[in-house]
Amino acid sequence: MTSADLLVDAFGRIKENVHGAVADLTQEELGTRLDPGANSIAWLIWHLTRVQDDHIADVADLPQVWTAAGWSKRFDLPFDDSATGYGQSPADVAALAAVPADLLLGYYDAVHAQTLTYVSTLTDPDLPRVVDTRWNPPVTLGVRLISVIDDDIQHSGQAAFIRGVLLRRR
């Protein structure tokens, strides 16, 4: 198994988590917040997808799927196209309440495809390449990819938790 195989496997597991968290939920359930300050499944899936899109596009020197493939226009959210969810307010989270599952998963799947196309080409010598000098120590490609995987796993797990609560409430 190569490092590219490991990355493809990790991102594949995230895809399973994302689809599992969204499957068979109503639009209302996707937008439900367990309390007024909490994130919804819709917001969590959008956020983890935006972060993955932003970070992978940056390291791969590719355009973001969000803007290049017109997803930002389809979502029609009331914030800048560069937003990824960091520092957003409860009102921003609420803006995702009207987003249907097919839109969330369509965008996620498009980002996933771009991610796999990129990571499947990587070799071990690619991973130590510095991709962000704003940190000390500077961030390497390997560290950035693990950071994206970690963020995606955490947020897809949060979405799965909310799903479980919502299904018990039915």
Image: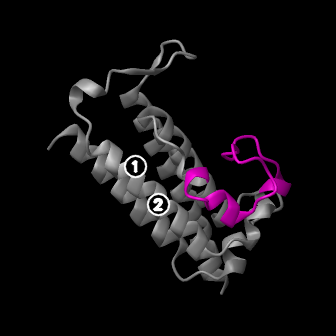
- Residue kind at label 2, given as amino acid type: Ala
Q: Residues within 10 Å of mark 2 (few under 14, many from 20)?
A: some
Q: Residue at x 28, y 53 (%)?
A: 9
Give the number of callouts: 2
Q: Which residue is mark 2?
A: 110
The reply to whether residue 39 is in sight is: yes
- Residue kind at label 1, given as amino acid type: Thr
Task: Please name the colour scheme applied to the rendered image.
Answer: one colour
Q: Which residues are magenta?
A: 67-92
**Residue 158, image x, y percentages:** 58, 58
**Residue 120, image x, y percentages:** 27, 46
User: Magenta span has 85?
Assistant: yes
- On the rendered image, what quadrant is the C terminus found in? bottom right
- On the rendered image, what quadrant is the N terminus found in? top left
Q: Disc number at residue 128?
A: none
Q: Secondary structure at mark 2?
A: helix
Q: Which residue is mark 1?
A: 115
